[in-house]
Amino acid sequence: MALHVPARNPARVLHAVDKARIPESPRWEQANLRRQAALERERSGALLQAHERALTRFTLLELFAEREVRRRTLIAFAMSLATTLAWWGISAWLRLTSRR
């Protein structure tokens, strides 16, 4: 049973190996510590400053908080959707034409 897990999920195995070998960047670790501290202060009921509130916000909302970031996010989403639909359409068309 244990031998089937790596064979079925090679990406997960590689991710686990890479995560164990490659350390996080110090900059990210510091930001994560600041975020965790701000979350603890929020849970304790303390009033947060503006920069602390930004740290406790849900990350997905951060993509739509500022006008320029929102614009770029929507453009990237539209481009991704267009390529996905194009590949889906091509693969469906090829399947239909190859049957003839």
Image: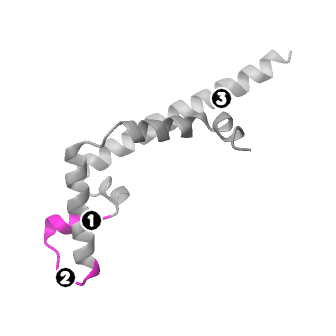
Quadrant housing the N terminus: top right
Q: Is residue 68 above or below residue 37?
A: above
Q: SS for tag 1?
A: helix
Mark 2–mark 1 CB contact (< 8 Å) = no
Amino acid identity at mark 2? Ala
- Side of 79 relative to 34 (left or right): right
Q: Is residue 83 left or right of residue 100?
A: left
CA distance for labels 1 and 3: 45 Å
Q: Amino acid at mark 1?
A: Gln
Q: Which residues are magenta?
A: 43-57
Q: Sequence order check: which comes first, mark 2 or mark 3?
A: 2
Q: Could you say which disc has been placed on residue 46 in the image? A: 2
> Which class describes the residues within 10 Å of circle 2: few (<14), some (14-19), or many (20+)?
few
Q: Which mark is residue 89?
A: 3
Q: Which residue is mark 1?
A: 36
| Tag 3 secondary structure | helix
At a point 19% along the width and 82% down the height, the residue shown is 46
Magenta includes 2?
A: no
SS class of the residue under badge 2? loop
Residue under the point 60% across and 27% down? 87
Report the number of numbered marks: 3
